[in-house]
Amino acid sequence: MRKLTEKKLVLASHNAGKLREISALVAPYDISVISAAELGFDEPEETEDTFAGNARIKAHYAAQKSGLPALSDDSGIMVDGLGGAPGVYTADWAETENGRDFVMAMTKTWTMLEDNNAPFPRNAQFCCTLCLAWPDGHDEIFDGKVQGSLTWPMRGDMGFGYDPIFIPDGFDITFGEMEASKKHEMSHRANAFTLLKQCLT
Ligand SMILES: O=c1nc[nH]c2c1ncn2[C@H]1C[C@H](O)[C@@H](COP(=O)(O)OP(=O)(O)OP(=O)(O)O)O1
Ligand SMILES: [Mg+2]
């Protein structure tokens, strides 16, 4: 396992919600971060069908372009009653002509569960793969998950994406209703980051 000796890191994401969360997770480590979005990098096409495959594409792309180590996040929600969909395609399900619409994507997800008469609890898991890549082509990969169930209607306006309908196991509030500091203790992203920490210390 390679450690990050550099004190500068590119966050290889264009998602403001993720950037906010990853910045907070990295904050204690005395590493200055800049996002691929701030550097004006375009988004590479996510052509793989696994979280790790797409995380690798994003991190290596930003590391090559910047000449700095880069950290990417590929994530999504896997819904049991939909055979694990939308999974790697979570962001794609929200795509419209006018950009992403997660209210539409969540409505579609719930409607499909209703149409399937899916039993309760409607279990789902958030998955996150973090990839730390260096300009020389080396990378380290870490996976995190959090189990929970889906609820309807949407609740809470904190967080992003599917947060308003996801209740993590052991709680009675959605990620949309949860303080960021609490989500950072137990989310899929936090769990992957706990493993990544070995590269930072
Ligand atoms: O904590 C989360 N809370 C709610 N929703 C979430 C979360 N984590 C991932 N998600 C959903 C929304 C996101 O759009 C998609 C991942 O898609 P994914 O391609 O990995 O990210 P993205 O395109 O939004 O940003 P980017 O690729 O620039 O990092 O899964
Ligand atoms: Mg993406």
Image: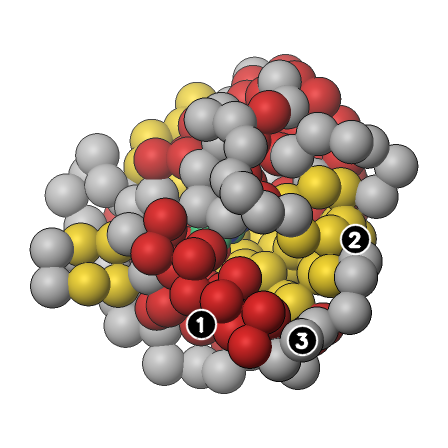
- Secondary structure of the residue carrying numbered label 3: loop
Q: Residues within 10 Å of mark 2 (few under 14, many from 20)?
A: some
Q: Quadrant of the N terminus?
A: bottom right
Residue 149 x, y percent position in the rendering = 73, 52
Q: Circle 3: is it few (<14), some (14-19), or many (20+) Cα within 10 Å?
A: few
Q: For the residue with label 1, is its CB less than 8 Å from the closest atom of ligand 1?
A: no
At x 18%, y 54%, the residue is: 99
Sequence-first disc among 3 and 1: 1
Q: Amino acid at mark 1?
A: Tyr
Residue 117: mark in rendering: 3
Q: Position of residue 198 (x, y in %)?
A: 77, 41
Q: Is residue 197 visible?
A: no
Upstream in the sequence, badge 1 or badge 2?
Answer: 1
Disc 2 target residue: 147
64 to 29, vertically: above or below: below
Task: Classify mark 1: residues with Cα within 10 Å, few (<14), some (14-19) or many (20+).
Answer: some
Q: Is residue 111 above or below residue 47?
A: above
Residue 181 is left or right of residue 51, and the answer is right
Q: List the residue tagged with mark 1.
A: 89
Residue type at tag 3: Asn
State how far apart marks 1 and 2 are (Cα): 18 Å
Residue mark closest to the camera, 3 vs 2: 3
In the image: residue 18, left or right of residue 188: left
Considering depth in this image, is 76 or 43 the residue closer to the camera? 76
Residue type, label 2: Gln
Q: Is residue 169 above or below residue 46?
A: above
The answer to which quarter of the image holds residue 139 is: bottom right
Q: Residue at x 62, y 80 (%)?
A: 116
